Image (cartoon, grey):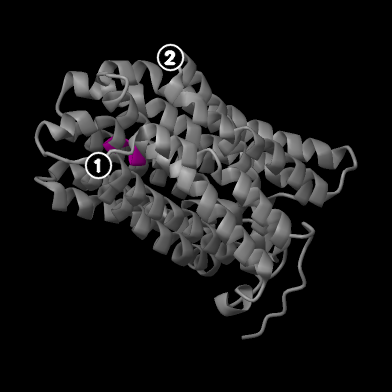
């Protein structure tokens, strides 16, 4: 169920990037303004990722997810009523405000329901929802655009989220109190920020998600602007890297769990998988000098590596911190990732509008995961449960 929710969230956030060419025929949007629209989403997403993690720790996964999904679905629908850049920016902000709590809730649910050896596999399944949503988006949105106006893209996708909310209310039952005894009290943020592991995960996510949000938001526009694609061509090709992203999510989670069941330590299992994932990312620097088919293949390898990486980074809070802190730490880490996306999306719009080109930008993002992995090695010396005292 949570994997489906994550898929819907990525479908919703891809509506604007995939439909941008059609939207621009009614509402002129420059590269800088496009980056500002993504920044509006990501700023709200960052704030809610942190606040949503705390909210989930207090409300629990069931009630928290209802609020989250309802909010972002209505925000998605509001795009369809936009009349200009400013109203689009407000809609993007509201969408980010809703979606920001999704992954903290997912991490919390995993910590409640799964033992350590199964958590990365479970997160891999959930994280594969990102790829499913992003993969479905190009052809589905192209089909809607072929049948009606771009405004209906947002109305149709918002309906999916509202239907999911009804499914969740009907079928999801919290298990924490039944299987694990009384709920652990939340741990204050200030206490969590005294751990170098918290800061290491936040910084690593800041850098690696700067690359991910560039891929997520700018790939369709790159295909429009540089490769001369139309909406139909984007629908035909752009789903392929996201399909490989889904395979990466499942593979990274499975491989780490497989190492654990083979007797390897938690530290070795997590870090080896993270390192192998990061090692794939520099290949994206070759995109600009490659023919379009090879460029799609290179993006696919990078998306595979990114989502394998992301699965492991998102499960580390559950590996390191007690259940009463997992949602809060996951929220802080997601806040860092979203702010990385804000900074680099704005930088991308500026660079492209000032003549630097996509080749320069791709060269930058090709290094980000390597740097992020080095940060994790320096700050998370050993992946094991930390002794966290509940004090202010």
Q: Nearer the viewer, residue 33 or 194?
A: 33
Look at 39% across and 18% down and name the residue there: 237
Q: Residue at x 9, y 45 (%)?
A: 83
Secondary-structure class at tag 2: loop
Question: Which comes before the other along the chain, label 2 or label 1?
Answer: 2
Q: Is residue 341 above or below residue 63?
A: above
Q: CA distance from mark 2 to mark 1?
A: 24 Å
Q: Is residue 286 visible?
A: yes
Q: In the image, 392: left or right of 259?
A: left
Does residue 13 appear left or right of residue 255 in this picture?
A: left
Q: Is residue 74 above or below residue 146?
A: below
List x then y, in percent, for residue 15: 30, 36
* Residue 300 pos. (x, y %): 52, 25
Q: Is residue 220 left or right of residue 375?
A: left
The residue positioned 56% from the left and 38% from the top of the image is 306
Q: Is residue 356 magenta?
A: no
Question: What residue appears at the point 35 percent right and 44 percent down from the top-left corner?
Answer: 348
Where is mark 2, residue-wise? 291
Q: Using a 10 Å C-alpha cutoff, classify the residue at mark 1 as few (fewer than 14 neighbours), some (14 to 19) or many (20 or more).
A: few
Nearer-the-camera pick, 61 or 33: 33
Circle on res. 353: 1
61 or 118: nearer the viewer: 118
Indicate yes or no whether the magenta region holds residue 15: yes
SS under mark 1: helix
Q: Position of residue 311 (x, y in %)?
A: 62, 43
Residue that extends furthest to the front in the rendered view of this protein? 355
Rendered image quadrant of residue 377: bottom right
- Where the C terminus falls, by quadrant? bottom right
The secondary structure that dominates the magenta segment is: helix
- Magenta-highlighted residues: 12-16
User: In which quadrant of the rendered view does residue 149 lie?
Assistant: top left
Query: Is residue 245 visible from the viewing direction of this image?
Result: no
């Amino acid at each position: 169920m949570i994997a489906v929710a994550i898929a819907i969230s990525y479908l919703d956030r891809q509506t604007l990037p995939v439909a941008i060419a059609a939207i621009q025929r009614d509402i002129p949007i420059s590269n800088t303004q496009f980056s500002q629209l993504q920044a509006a989403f990501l700023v709200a997403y960052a704030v809610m990722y942190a606040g949503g993690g705390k909210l989930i720790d207090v409300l629990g996964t069931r009630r928290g997810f209802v609020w989250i999904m309802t909010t972002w679905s209505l925000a998605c629908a509001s795009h369809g009523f936009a009349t200009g850049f400013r109203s689009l920016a407000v809609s993007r902000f509201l969408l980010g405000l809703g979606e920001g709590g999704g992954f903290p809730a997912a991490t919390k649910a995993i910590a409640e329901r799964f033992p350590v050896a199964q958590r990365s596999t479970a997160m891999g399944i959930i994280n594969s929802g990102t790829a499913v949503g992003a993969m479905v988006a190009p052809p589905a949105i192209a089909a809607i655009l072929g049948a009606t106006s771009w405004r209906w893209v947002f109305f149709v996708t918002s309906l999916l989220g509202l239907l999911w909310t009804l499914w969740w209310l009907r079928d999801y039952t919290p298990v924490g109190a039944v299987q694990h005894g009384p709920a652990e009290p939340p741990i204050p943020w200030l206490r969590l920020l005294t751990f170098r592991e918290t800061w290491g995960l936040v910084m690593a996510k800041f850098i690696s998600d700067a690359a991910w949000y560039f891929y997520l938001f700018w790939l369709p526009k790159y295909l429009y602007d540089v490769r001369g694609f139309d909406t139909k061509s984007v629908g035909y090709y752009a789903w392929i890297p996201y399909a490989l992203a889904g395979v990466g999510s499942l593979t990274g989670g499975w491989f780490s769990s497989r190492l654990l069941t083979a007797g390897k330590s938690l530290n070795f299992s997590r870090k080896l998988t993270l390192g192998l994932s990061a090692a794939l990312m520099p290949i994206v620097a070759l995109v600009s000098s490659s023919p379009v088919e090879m460029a799609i293949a290179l993006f696919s390898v990078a998306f595979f590596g990114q989502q394998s990486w992301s699965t492991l980074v998102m499960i580390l809070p559950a590996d390191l911190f007690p259940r009463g802190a997992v949602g809060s730490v996951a929220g802080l880490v997601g806040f860092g990732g979203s702010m990385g996306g804000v900074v680099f999306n704005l930088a991308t719009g500026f660079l492209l509008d000032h003549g630097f080109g996509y080749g320069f930008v791709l060269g930058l993002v090709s290094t980000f995961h390597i740097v992020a992995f080095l940060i994790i090695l320096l700050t998370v010396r050993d992946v094991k449960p930390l002794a966290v005292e509940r004090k202010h």
